[in-house]
Amino acid sequence: MTNSLYVSSPVNALVQGILREDKTLEQVLHRGDFGLGTFDDLDGEMVLVDGIFYQLRSDGSALIPDLSIGTPYACVTHFKPTDTIELSTQVSLLQIQKLISESLLSSNLVYAIRMVGVFSKIRARSVPKQHAYRPLVDVAGDQKEFHYENIAGQLVGFWTPDFMHSITVPGYHLHFLSEDKSHGGHLLDCIVDSGTVWLQPIDQLDLDLPHTIEYLHANLDKDVSSDLNKAEH
């Protein structure tokens, strides 16, 4: 059975400052129960898990948003993991990524990643709501970082091949949500004491191309992969 990744708008548009689209969370929810993204005007980071959206605000708090809210970029799937990795000793983010990479069937597929565990350290970030269209690399300078210690929670996200960099974020892209669903953000670094990782290979892509005036008149031919890398890491 094939698995599909739904992307609501090419990430290139977001990188170039198109921070508002007409796709609602309710519409995205029909395309998957798991994933991540952001909200119109970059008003926080998005986590979608078990069919529930969480909005990770610029102060590190998490709330459940109204489904009428729009998103300029969301990346979701119906999560049905096929592989599991158990983490029984303390590992760094780089070590986790290495373990996952060694488990991938092919580096030419997309993988949905969910990890539940106990973290001795988490470094995450979110950006405040924007009131003007600015390139993502400039907005990233406004990001607020959060540091958590000895906290239980989960990582939600994807690994994506580099050749898809104009469509979605390449490499590892993960968001953190605390176990009590009260805190979270875009993952920058972590140390995990113990946990479980679930992986789902994805071999189909479903990409929406928006019809907003800003999108239709944008020049998306520019290679913005360098700016995307700076903004996401």
Image: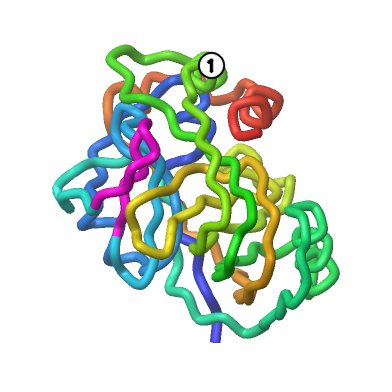
> Residue 179 placed where, x, y %?
42, 64
Q: Is residue 156 visible?
A: no
Q: Report which quarter residue 166 is drawn in.
A: top right
Question: Please, is residue 140 above or below residue 12 in the view?
Answer: above
**Of 39 and 144, which appears nearest the observer?**
144
Span colored in magenta: 53-63
> Residue 183 placed where, x, y %?
39, 49
- Who's the residue at 31% across and 69% down the image? 51
Q: Quadrant of the C terminus?
A: top right
Q: Is residue 179 left or right of residue 20?
A: right
**Of 196 and 209, which appears nearest the observer?**
196
Q: Is residue 110 left or right of residue 11?
A: right
- Who's the residue at 71% across and 25% down the image? 226
Residue ID for mark 1:
141
**Of 164 and 60, which appears nearest the observer?**
60
- Who's the residue at 50% across and 81% down the image? 80
The image shows a total of numbered marks equal to: 1
Residue 5 lies in the magenta stretch? no
Q: Report which quarter residue 26 is drawn in.
A: bottom left
> Residue 220 placed where, x, y %?
53, 25
Question: Please, is residue 153 above or below residue 215 in the view?
Answer: below
**Of 189 and 67, which appears nearest the observer?**
189
Mark 1 residue type: Gly
> Residue 41 placed where, x, y %?
31, 27
Q: Is residue 194 visible?
A: yes
> What secondary structure is found at the residue carrying circle 1?
helix
